Image (spheres, rainbow, N blue to C red):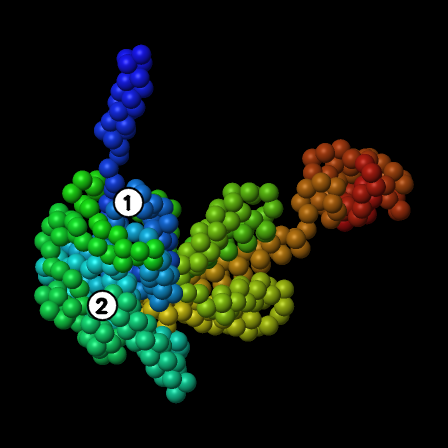
Amino acid sequence: MRSRFYLPKIFLILLVGSILLTATPKEIWVLEVDGVINPVSASYINDNLRKAQPDQVECLIIQMDTPGGLMTSMRDIIKNILNSEIPVVVYVSPRGAQCASAGVFIAVSAHFVAMSPGTNIGAAHPVNLGGGGIGGQPDSASSQTMIEKATNDAVAYIRSLARERGRNEEWLEKAVRESASITETEAVKLQVVDVVVDDLDELLEILDGKTFKLPSGEKTVHTQEATIRFRPVGIHHRILDVISDPTVAYILLMLGFYGIYFELSNPGAIFPGVLGAIFLILAFFAFQVLPINYAGLALIILGIILFILEVKIVSYGLLTIGGIVAMIFGSLMLIDVNQAPEILKAVSLKVILPIVIFTAAFVIISLTLALKAHKRKPTTGIEGMIGETGQTITDVDKTGMAIVHGEYWKVRSDTPIPKGTEIVVLDVDRMVLKVKPK
């Protein structure tokens, strides 16, 4: 009886022990943000924040080296950090890295901030946000007012984040209003960041045992037994990051227009249409990352329409000139650099002018050749026989025989034609040619 009683208890102890021995240790996720803050980097960070479960991940470390980026993407990242149930650490690394503009806001929102030696943080003024002409300079009093509104909004935002995380509100306001920037040691002294560390291992040692405030309560981080897991950028994010260059996106857009146009002008070619559709999809995929001015896109489409109309309407070149002007201005306006002038550049004129000239020449020449082909006299088939010359091989009295194009044909004529007379074909009635003497 006693052995039967102890058997289940021993089995339970062994089961619990095996579970404890095989229990998977928690992980520390490390993300790498090296470049501008845009929807690509925002999606990369936010996807990992959503996937990280509190019972599996101790904390999430963002290794950052950024010149800044889009305010909309920045706010999207910060919103997810503030509502994260996992502590988020920003580590400005490697040596020589910077944390500027939008990166400053993200760093301030993190639960813990570390910097490598030889790095700097600051210069968070929202340059030219809210308006401006081509080239990104304010062109009116209203533009200046919009810049001031954006600056005041950014100041209020960063002070709110600093108050939430217990950081230096006064200096951070100075970073926004005056574009102030400081080194890593100055940042620690001014309580802008928490610590300067040489590498990731030293950072993990400092984090071990620290307690952070989360929306659901406090959490103590244990890093000694945790497994470090680097979370690389996915292939779709890498592709989007490459094609999100304004010049690349613009070239993809034009190549897409060429492919679709060639397919419509030569139905059944298939390959140009498929290639054009792929280029257009990639271009619009890139446009979801870039701030697009849709007036510029409309001007580009208008320019192509004007090139097509030039062939059908006698305008003595006015439509071509209008199309070139529309495409040049549309191309210059396509990317709204005012939303992030420190990281975005308009498409270069060195790229725009050759593409516009080539587009004008391509459309006008191809349409002109197509119209000439439609108007050209048929050279094959029954219609091609009309107007051809030949010679009678018999007397033609209403009907007879003749040679046309080296072929024997039955011919008829309203007037008699002697044998050996040169003739001209007037019409074709089934397999009989109506002719007259040349």
Question: How far across and down, in percent of the image, does residue 134 sit?
Answer: 38, 75
**Residue 388: quadrant of the picture:** top right
Asked if 2 appears above or below 425 in the picture, the reply is: above
Residue type (three-letter) at the residue carrying disc 1: Val
Q: In this view of the protein, which residue sits in the foreground, 182 or 248? A: 182
Q: Are marks 1 and 2 in contact (CB under 8 Å)?
A: no
Residue placed under numbered mark 2 in the picture: 166
Residue placed under numbered mark 1 in the picture: 57
Which residue: 21% across, 58% down? 112
Specify whether residue 216 is in view.
Answer: yes
Q: Is residue 416 left or right of residue 27?
A: right
Question: How far across and down, in percent of the image, does residue 200 sit?
Answer: 15, 49
Residue type (three-letter) at the residue carrying disc 2: Gly
**Sequence-earlier tag: 1 or 2:** 1
Q: Is residue 355 left or right of residue 88?
A: right
Which residue: 49% across, 63% down? 360
Question: How far across and down, in percent of the image, does residue 116 sit?
Answer: 13, 57
Which dot marks residue 66?
A: none
Asked if 10 appears above or below 159 in the picture, the reply is: above
Query: Which image quarter holds the N terminus?
Result: top left
In the picture as drawn, the residue positioned furthest to the front comes out as 1
Callout 2: helix, strand or loop? loop
What's the distance in space between the residues labelled 1 and 2, CA to CA?
25 Å
Specify whether residue 251 is in view.
Answer: no
Which residue: 61% across, 46% down? 267
